[in-house]
Structure formats: C-alpha cells, structure tokens
Amino acid sequence: MWSLPSMVNAFRAGLAVAILAGVIGWFMVLRRQSFAGHSIAVTGFPGAAAAVYLGLSATVGYFGFCIGSALVIALLARGSGTGVGERAHSSALIAVVQAFALALGAVFLDLYGGFLSSTSAFLFGNFLGITDEDVLTLVAVAVVVLLAMAVIGRRLLFASVDPAVAAARGVPVRALSVLYLVLLGATVAEVSKFTGSLLVFALLVMPAATAQVITARPGLSLLYTVVIGVLVTWFGLAWAYFGNQATGFTITSLAFACYVLAYAAKSVRRTLRQGRPGRLEVA
C-alpha cells in the first residue's frame, strides 16, 4: 500500500482533513449548527458543477458557493438564534438556501448535457486521485483556518456556550458568528474536493458528536475529536484499499460505529448509576 504515491497522498491529505474538519466541526456541533454545515456542504456540488460548466477549476466553484452560502446564512439569520422564533426563522432560511443550491446543481447538470463525468467525485469525493499539489493546497488552507480559530477560539467558545452573557461582557457575538460561518465555508470548500459534498459532513459532525458524548470538558473533547477523526480516516483508507471498498463508505461507517459505541457506553453507565443503591446515612 505504501508503495503507491496515491495512497501516501491520501493518508497525508486525510490527516489534514481530519484535523481541520475536527476543529471546525467541534464548534459546529457545540453551536448546534449542524444543519447549517450540511447545507453549506451541499452547495459545494452546484458550485463545482457550475465551475466545470464554465470551464473553470472546480476549486473556484467550491469556494465561491460554500463561502457565499455561509455569508447568506450568517448575514440574513436574525440575532444569535437563542429564541424559539429566531431558531425557526434560521432553520427555514437554511433550508431555502439548501433547496436552491440543489436546484442550481440540477440546472448546471442539464446545461452540461444531462451528464457530468465527475458528478460522483463532486458528491462522494476521490481520495485516491490526490496529487502532491493538492496536499500542499489543503495543508495551506488548513493552517490559515486553524490559525484564525486559534485567535478567536476562546471568545467563540464563550459566545457558543452562553451568547447572552458573552454579549453583555462585550464579546462581539454577531461578528464571531459571521466569521465562524465563513471559516466553516472555507473548510467545507477545501475538504469537499477530497471527500465530496455529501461525505464532508460525516467528518465534520460524527467525530465531534462522538467526543462530546464521551466528555463535556471542552479541551479534552476537542482533542478526542481530532484523534477520532484521524483514526477513522486512516483506518477507513486502509479498509478501502484492502477490502476494495469505496472510501466514502468505509470512513463514514467507522465514524458512525464510533458514535454508536460511545452513545451505548454512556447509556450503560447512566443505567448502572441510576440502579446503584444510595448510601445509608448513620445519625
């Protein structure tokens, strides 16, 4: 396996993808913006299809549509979304953006002649087609996004946990929300080149959701997210190679299995704790 340059590049790219998607995805799950992340990921498909139809690089379409949809969601959503009405409005807005993006994808496929040879790669990715230049580009984007997250991470965590108190303490909650969604859009755009518009969501949400089931401590949970993402990606690539399976299926299946096991273990611990007899106090 290691004698193939395509597999070596796949493991290198998988490391960068897992770290980048893990950090961004951890905040996405914490902020309960998984639906927004999914919608932004879906818009990468019509973006790539439009770019190919116009004779441009698919990367241009990924970044243009993903960041554009992130800005639309961020700028049109009302407030911080803490109220029931505001959350309903935001969910409806995100659904509208997602539906319109899928409609655009159908339009560009039809304009291209009803068939686009790279449709499968746009939707489900192509880890085995990664070049050295692709790895360098991915690492560069990952470094920029992670540096930005390092700068805003502490305040973003405060604004995510308790936006009302954070705003009262002078934290720019609204600006942080917009900036985070832009970083999420950039992450989705870059990672989608390798995982596809549909499977990027698996690496964004499942390792983070699993880690937050295991522990509520922010630092440890974030570390677990990255570790789970890396292990799932690497083992998924090895499984795909030796088992002759699609990488999207293997990586997603392993990530889902980790979440199921973590949730089951938590449920068992809760049941045992509730069934344990209390202490007898002696006066």
Image: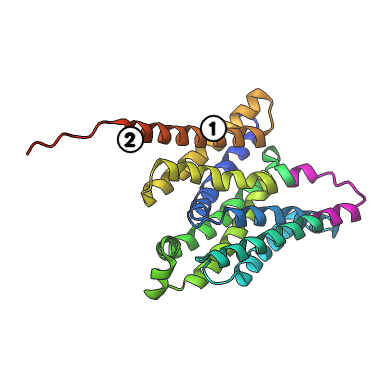
* Mark seen at residue 200: none
Give the residue at mark 1: 257
As drawn, 148 above or below 22: below
Residue stretch rendered in magenta on the structure: 105-122
| Neighbours of disc 1 within 10 Å: few (<14), some (14-19), many (20+) | some
Q: Position of residue 159 (x, y in %)?
A: 44, 65
Q: What secondary structure predominates along the stretch shown in magenta?
A: helix
As drawn, 238 above or below 166: above
Q: Secondary structure at mark 2?
A: helix
Q: Residue at x 56, y 36 (%)?
A: 256
Q: Is residue 100 left or right of residue 69?
A: right
Amino acid bearing label 2: Gln
**152 inside magenta stretch:** no
Name the one closer to the observer, 237 or 258.
258
Q: Secondary structure at mark 1?
A: helix
Q: Residue at x 63, y 47 (%)?
A: 200
Q: Position of residue 35 (x, y in %)?
A: 61, 54
Q: Is residue 81 visible?
A: yes
Give the residue at mark 2: 274
* Mark nearer the N terminus (2 vs 1): 1
Image quarter in which the N terminus is found? top right
Q: Position of residue 182 (x, y in %)?
A: 59, 64
Mark 2 or mark 1, whichever is nearer to me: 2
Name the one closer to the observer, 283 or 263.
283
